[in-house]
Amino acid sequence: MVIDANKKEVRDIYSLAIRTTIQELQENSAMNMIKAVNPKLVRGLKIGKDEVKEECLDILADFFRKFGSLLSKKSNLINKDELMKILCELLIIQNDAVRKRATNCLGQFAVILSGKQLQQLVAVLIDRLRKSGNNKHDLLVQIQCICHITRSVGGKLAHNFNQIIPLLQQYPAQLDEDQSSDIDNEIAETALNAIENLILKCQNEARQALQSLFELTGKCLVYDPNYTYHDEDGAGDEDMDEGNEDWGSDFYDDE
């Protein structure tokens, strides 16, 4: 019904029923449900409308979050390679809601991947970062996905630390106080969050990058995108004085 329902209200009800069942289900009883539900979710991701894809992604994220240990031990329970390919493709479609849910789902999915599969996923995301060009919205999605992954499995990315950090550092380093934009600020903030996750979980590797990280954070500490840096000197003070002409001692005497 989640995949085939034409009405959003019906689809939402059945999706909620499945997600509630996932939360209540114990691991020793989950295998049959996963075998029954996963193929339908995969079909929804492949051929479903965008609204269907959103629901399927939310359900899958719950599966990975609740039964991560089981899915890691039973490697043949789901086709991880197929899912990885599908989820990576959803990161580059036009629907923002689907892409947002795909980033969250991949963050949870990374927990159940083998070391080789995780390296493949990271390689895809790094390659997209390097080829993103001037499409800042696509760039933001890829960085958000990396941020989710570093939060969930950051410690497993120790071998990628020296590869990922320089890529992420360039975005906050490029912030320009004269050309501040919301998308640039969001990209920089997300990149900094991912860097923080990696530092917390790869502390030995982080020691080698301390100098560049200190320089970067020092620059970001004095960057305020909401402040007009080159306003005419004294203009703000004059405006305040003009606005307060009627607030002299006579006003308080009258009161």
Image (tube, grey):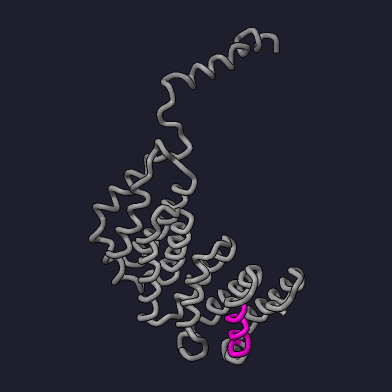
Depth check, front residue: 88 or 111: 88
Main SS class of the magenta portion in the image:
helix
| Count of numbered circles in the view | 0
Magenta stretch: residue 159 in it?
no
Vertical order, 188 against 145 (above or below)? above
Vertical order, 171 against 145 (above or below)? above
Residue 200 as seen in the image, left or right of residue 13: left
Q: Position of residue 129 (x, y in %)?
A: 38, 61
Vertical order, 56 against 71 (above or below)? above
Vertical order, 75 against 130 (above or below)? below
Q: Residue at x 76, y 70 (%)?
A: 7
Instruction: Magenta stretch: give its range.
Output: 34-44
The quarter in which the N terminus is drawn is bottom right
Q: Position of residue 240 (x, y in %)?
A: 54, 19
Q: Residue at x 39, y 55 (%)?
A: 133
Depth check, front residue: 136 or 218: 136
Q: Position of residue 44 (x, y in %)?
A: 62, 78
Q: Residue at x 62, y 89 (%)?
A: 36
The quarter in which the C terminus is drawn is top right
Magenta stretch: residue 39 in it?
yes
Q: Position of residue 132 (x, y in %)?
A: 40, 59
- Determine the image quadrant of residue 222: top left
